Amino acid sequence: MFKEKIKQLSESDIKYIEQQIDKLENEYKNNALATKNGMWRIASNAELFPTNELNSEGILTPEQRRTTWAYVISFLERYSEFLEFSDGAKISEYETLMINWRQ
């Protein structure tokens, strides 16, 4: 669904999304508002929705959250073996993110 869109990401976009995912997994872990805002930032950066459809307060609709989550999963499937996160570990699976996001 997002393969072509993900292939077209610039190096800086990849780094930015990597940083947001890292924050979701670590820094934002127990902060629901920060988690929602982090997902909004990913959606905005990846241009998943027209600008006029994004809430200026940094909150996604339930449908936008599902779409953005699907995008994050596709992103991780493509790049996770190459990404280094703040703890120095390389992500090979994203179950932790999934558990945190669904809470």
Image (tube, rainbow, N blue to C red):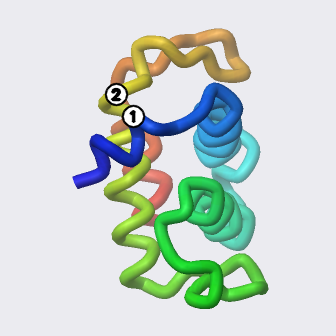
Q: Secondary structure at mark 2?
A: helix
Q: Picture coordinates of residue 95 (x, y %)? A: 34, 38
Q: Picture coordinates of residue 82 (x, y %)? A: 48, 12
- Please tell me whether residue 11 is drawn above or below residue 3 in the rendered image: above
Label pair 1/2, CB-CB below 8 angstroms: yes
Residue at the image position 54 percent from the left and 79 percent from the top: 50
> CA separation, marks 1 and 2?
9 Å
Q: Amino acid at mark 2?
A: Arg
| Quarter of the view holding residue 27 | top right
Q: Picture coordinates of residue 64 (x, y %)? A: 44, 77
Residue assigned mark 1? 7
* Residues packed near mark 2 inside 10 Å, few (<14), some (14 to 19) or many (20 plus): few
Residue 22 shown left or right of residue 70 in the figure: right
Residue 79 shown left or right of residue 52 in the figure: left
Residue at the image position 70 percent from the left and 32 percent from the top: 12
Q: Secondary structure at mark 1?
A: helix
- Please tell me whether residue 91 is drawn above or below residue 30 in the rendered image: above
Between marks 1 and 2 in the image, the one whose residue lies nearer the viewer: 1
Residue assigned mark 2? 78
